Image: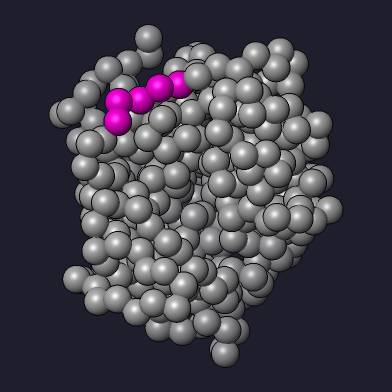
Amino acid sequence: MSSTSSELQNGNDKKTDIVVVGSCMIDLVSYVPRLPMPGETIHGTKFQQGFGGKGANQCVAAAKLGASTALVAKLGGDNFGACYLSELNQYDNLSTRYVSRAGEGISSGMASISVSSNGENQIVIVPGANSTLCNSDIDAALPLLRNSKVVVFQGETPWSTTRYCLDKMVHTEVLSILNVAPAPSIPCSDLITSLTLASIVCVNEVEAELLTQIKLDSEEHISDSLDSLFSLGCKTVIITLGANGAVFATSKSRTVEKVQVKKVDHPVDTTGAGDCFLGALAYFISYFPSLPLGEQISRACKIARLSVMQCGTQPSFPSLSLLEFLDESLLSIK
């Protein structure tokens, strides 16, 4: 792990419940009437710069719910990296001790996002420093990782690093969630191995189709897609279906269970909704372990649903105080 200065450290090595190993991106967001077609230039209505990246998003989502969290990530040696670190350090329950800075000349990760008037989005990422997260970064954070309850991974950092970390946690009681996002059309060997090591694999419709080459246009095809993922060695699989909730199954029973959620009639911005779901899922698994997985998924879906009613990514994630005000049943142990 590259050297870190004191400015990088927020939090200490006390037990942390949720650790996210993943990416940080600077979001460059253009709001447009509709998403452009290939080769087309259109006028936007608004521009915003924000903080994103699937890893940081998921960590912030859990932190805003009150979880004790930590992020293992790599920022660029540029002003964007310094600004992002300052943003993360605003959360007292989010440790940045293992967020390090890449060397000079390596930029922070960037995400160019277009959001249409109906809330749909289109995203292009340039990984930058995220691509330099490596095994030595994992080794430095191993005590933290092995003493946590849940560790979350995504696909915006090297799959080789993810596989290495999962392998290091095989003989622990830590539950691991692997969010295969973005998903490659041709999985590499490190990703295939990671699928077999993770406790839970979570994908959306597009990612499931890329991994299995099965279009999810019917219940039968959804079941076939789950079977295909189990054939790759997955233990438990969750497929999120946007406004239609989610489905999940385990390799042992293969019984497909549905989780439905009330549809949002006029979503404002769906950017980061999947990350909000993952952060909330990690929260419920950590702090409500007695709940069935289906109920944990259902509550995470409801929290993600709230996020699409607001602009932005991390600012749209609900806080614990908001949940206490809107729906205390989400925080019930029953």
The residue at the point 54 percent across, 61 percent down is 23
Q: Quadrant of the C terminus?
A: top left
In this view, 264 is above or below 28: above
- What stretch of residues is rendered in magenta? 259-263
- The quarter of the picture where residue 178 lies is top right
Residue 299, given in percent of the width and then of the height, sits at 38, 25
Q: Nearer the viewer, residue 8 or 39?
A: 39
Q: Is residue 85 magenta?
A: no
In this view, 236 is above or below 318: above
The residue at the point 45 percent across, 78 percent down is 39
Task: Name the magenta segment's main secondary structure.
Answer: loop
In this view, 129 is above or below 248: below
Residue 69, given in percent of the width and then of the height, sits at 46, 45
Residue 62, given in percent of the width and then of the height, sits at 41, 41
The residue at the point 47 percent across, 35 percent down is 241
The residue at the point 50 percent across, 35 percent down is 240
Q: Is residue 262 magenta?
A: yes
Residue 135, given in percent of the width and then of the height, sits at 74, 62
Q: Is residue 175 visible?
A: no
Give the side of residue 169 with respect to residue 41, left or right.
Answer: right
